[in-house]
Image (cartoon, rainbow, N blue to C red):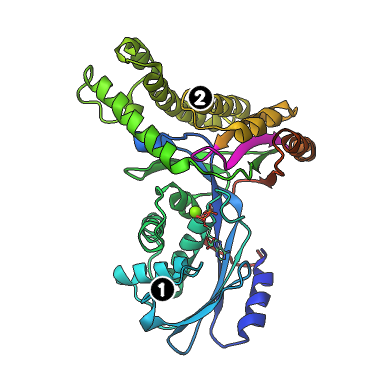
């Protein structure tokens, strides 16, 4: 969304006023590689996308906060001093939660605001429209109030809102990527410590294609919990050899292979093998991207998917079909599932000249093989949360 368009939308909704109108934007995100290793002490490697959530806002003379979105019909005008007395169960719980959290941190709003949101991220597709909504709200309100905008702190407080106020259990990767992403970079992140590094990711003539399987995800929670306890069990076994081992991902692949005989069954060993090797693949990806070797990175993406499918067993027919078809297109460097699995999206790295063919052929084959109409989003790597200034 262009800045000027957003200004017009805001004025036609709320009218003119002498108060300055400012426009902010936060992106969606995709995890490029490093799946199911955050809770095992490994790195995730997300990137911010070029599309996101725009927020236009302006101070009001009274103490009311008005919430409206171009995407959803529900709107509300609430008294700042009564905010959060009751949760609405509507989308405004996200920005209301942010205002309450800012208040807890000593950044109580000085007065009312008119807010208008416009989102380009499909909701509920795993591209983190909720994190984008939270982060843009926090960043914009802190900026308007003349307060410091520390993007690491904004990620933390946004995650607290999602977990606590909204009540959705999730790690911090989404909010962190949305808040701290940068154009032409991916983010190497250790979720526990928030130690992070921006790594150059110059996609050049290549695009990311995110393919939504549109598969309803039923089993995610129970399977996720099962994987976590399998990892704990594997860690217990390994600690007999290495008592100080804190996390699975801290082990080297060669070491794990040496101790294979300690595992009573193949399943636990395979889970551990995925974790250890996936973490190694993330670190190799950092090297590949730093050397601008997209081909090598594509191969790591492929290996990641195969490991999630065969060793960690969190893929499903739809994800596998999407990945298989994507890899058939000449110009695809790599394709893998992204997210927890059992549905959701895949991410592929595809030459721009092959994008049209990809969309036509993968879409057709996917429909034929699964009976589901997939959805495809083509994008580059964008900036983290920022104020939109000047022309764009
Ligand atoms: P995801 O984060 O994967 O897109 P979630 O279910 O976590 O999916 O978050 C989607 C919810 O976030 C929507 O149902 C809505 O409540 C809220 N949301 C996201 N973007 C917007 C927007 N532009 N306007 C209003 N609400 C939004
Ligand atoms: Mg979400």
Q: Is residue 344 magenta?
A: yes
- The image quadrant where one finds the C terminus is bottom right
Q: Which mark is residue 356?
A: none
- Residue located beneath label 1 in the image: 146
In the image, residue 292 lies at what x, y percent? 59, 31
In front here: 184 or 57? 57
Q: Is residue 231 visible?
A: yes
In front here: 255 or 7? 255
Q: Is residue 241 left or right of residue 134?
A: left
> Which element carries disc 1, helix, strand or loop?
loop
In the image, residue 198 lies at what x, y percent? 47, 42
Residue in the picture at 54% in, 56% down: 129
Residue in the picture at 20% in, 23% down: 243
Mark 2 surroundings: few (<14), some (14-19) or many (≥20) residues within 10 A:
many
Q: Can residue 42 be seen in this view?
A: no
Q: Residue 307 carries which label?
A: 2
Residue in the picture at 51% in, 43% down: 218
């Amino acid at each position: 969304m262009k800045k000027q368009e957003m200004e017009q939308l805001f004025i036609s909704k709320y009218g003119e006023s002498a108060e300055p109108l400012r426009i902010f934007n936060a992106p969606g995100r995709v995890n490029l590689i490093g799946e199911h290793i955050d809770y095992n002490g490994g790195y995730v490697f997300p990137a911010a996308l070029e599309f996101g959530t725009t927020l236009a806002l302006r101070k009001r003379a009274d103490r009311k906060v008005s919430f409206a979105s171009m995407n959803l019909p529900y709107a509300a005008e609430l008294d700042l001093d009564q905010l959060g007395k009751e949760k609405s169960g509507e989308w405004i719980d996200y920005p209301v939660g942010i205002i309450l959290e800012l208040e807890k941190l000593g950044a109580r709003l000085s007065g009312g605001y008119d807010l208008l949101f416009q989102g380009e991220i499909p909701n509920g597709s795993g591209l983190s429209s909720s994190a984008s909504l939270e982060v843009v709200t926090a960043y914009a309100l802190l900026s308007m109030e003349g307060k410091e905008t520390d993007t690491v702190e904004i990620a933390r407080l946004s995650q607290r809102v999602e977990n606590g106020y909204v009540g959705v259990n999730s790690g911090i990767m989404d909010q962190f990527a949305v808040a701290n992403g940068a154009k032409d970079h991916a983010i190497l992140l250790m979720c526990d410590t928030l130690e992070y590094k921006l790594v150059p990711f110059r996609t050049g003539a290549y695009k990311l294609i995110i393919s939504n399987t549109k598969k309803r995800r039923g089993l995610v929670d129970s399977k996720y919990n099962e994987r976590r306890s399998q990892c704990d069990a594997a860690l217990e076994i390994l600690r007999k050899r290495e008592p100080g081992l804190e996390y699975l991902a801290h082990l080297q692949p060669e070491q794990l292979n040496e101790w294979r005989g300690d595992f009573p069954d193949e399943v636990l060993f395979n889970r551990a093998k995925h974790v250890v090797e996936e973490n190694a693949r993330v670190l190799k990806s950092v090297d590949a991207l730093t050397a601008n070797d997209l081909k090598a990175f594509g191969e790591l993406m492929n290996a990641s998917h195969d490991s999630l499918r065969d060793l960690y067993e969190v893929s499903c027919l739809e994800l596998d079909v999407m990945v298989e078809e994507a890899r058939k297109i000449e110009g695809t460097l790599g394709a893998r599932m992204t997210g927890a699995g059992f549905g959701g999206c895949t991410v592929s790295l595809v030459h721009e000249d092959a994008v049209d063919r990809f969309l036509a052929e993968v879409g057709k084959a996917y429909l034929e093989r699964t009976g589901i109409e997939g959805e495809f989003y083509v994008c580059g790597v964008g900036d983290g949360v920022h104020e939109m200034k000047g022309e764009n």
